[in-house]
Amino acid sequence: MDSETTVRTGEAYVSGALTALEEGARMRLFYELLAEVVESVGLRAYLPHRVSDPVAAAHLEPRAVYDIDRAHVTSARVVVAYAGIPSFGVGIEVELAREHAVPVVLVVERERTVSRLLLGNPAVVEVVRFADLDGLRRGLAAALERIAAIAPGAASPAVSDDVVVQRFLASLEQARHLPDGEIAALLRIGELDGEAASTIRDAVATGRLFGAGLRDLVGRHALRGADLGVFVLRDVLERSLADTARAIGLDARATRKRLESARSRVGLAADASGPDIAQWLVTELIAPPTRALQLHLFSGGHDAA
């Protein structure tokens, strides 16, 4: 059996809310679409609603449903989980995947908010956000291809450091870039325009600033206006204080005050050293799935029990 066939052998568990759905029929069709994408890359799809649906298979005891679904999750090559509808079942299945070193791909509409707890689960190695079904097909297929290219460990159920490194690197690209429209919206929310905004936009396009990091600076840390511009130009892009002041349109003293204010807001000391700032950038300005994988890797590659 050649290596190409080997890496594509396995089952993909399609996880999604099933209980008390307002549009159950439509959602089941959506899960069937996910299964089509899964099978297009050479994996077998397992859909719980074909076996243990709460309506069609109402006769099954809850423990039987748990045992059936658990067996399929823990033996899967990958779990594809729809995160657009909050679901206890999906959360449990993702955690089961983590316990058994099964990678998880989350799929969710671009505008939907997803729990940070779910995004931060170390099993989640890809997040596919989509605006339409064509985008979903392309994004999910590409994510599954990347996972299929990583051979599953046969000697041990634990995820090896090499595999974690590969997943970490594969997740960087998604964390790095955001759609142009979202970047523009973030800069509007951040009340920044002119040369500073153009510089930040270029930094995201060229990969010097993670798009997800800009999202965190504007959203989680609520940086606005000159504080946002000064922090990105000086501490992220390492512009000189004079160059930063010129781009923002402030004098050096006012620029320094803005920098101290921004550092305080993100939890850095006003006089933070270069290494401290660099460490903060690495751990804070990357997407949650990437951060979780990084912490998993550098803690020795093993999750706590």
Image (tube, helix red, strand yellow):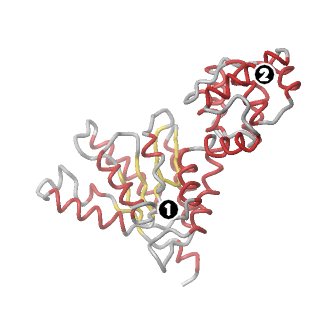
Q: Find residue 59 and report its horizontal and vertical position in percent.
A: 11, 57
**Looking at the image, is 102 positioned above or below residue 269?**
below
Quadrant of the frame with the C terminus: bottom left
Quadrant of the frame with the N terminus: bottom right
Residue carrying label 1: 40
Q: Find residue 135 and report its horizontal and vertical position in percent.
A: 55, 44
Residue in the picture at 50% in, 68% down: 159
**Which image quarter: residue 226?**
top right
Residue in the picture at 31% in, 44% down: 87
Camera-side residue of 109 and 283: 283
Q: Find residue 64 and report its horizontal and vertical position in percent.
A: 18, 62
On screen, residue 135 versus residue 245, left or right, reads left
Camera-side residue of 187 and 136: 187
Work out which residue is located at the far left of the displayed protein and give it.
59
On screen, residue 299 versus residue 208, left or right, reads left
Residue carrying label 2: 256
> Disc 1 marks which amino acid?
Ser
**Under tag 1, what secondary structure?**
helix
Q: What is the C-alpha distance between the residues marked 1 and 2? A: 55 Å
Residue in the picture at 54% in, 64% down: 301
Crowdedness of circle 1 by 10 Å Cα count: few (<14), some, many (20+)? few
**Looking at the image, is 295 positioned above or below residue 276?**
below
> Disc 2 marks which amino acid?
Arg
Indicate which disc, 1 or 2, sits on the residue closer to the N terminus. Answer: 1
**Which image quarter: residue 204?**
top right
**Looking at the image, is 298 positioned above or below residue 55?**
below
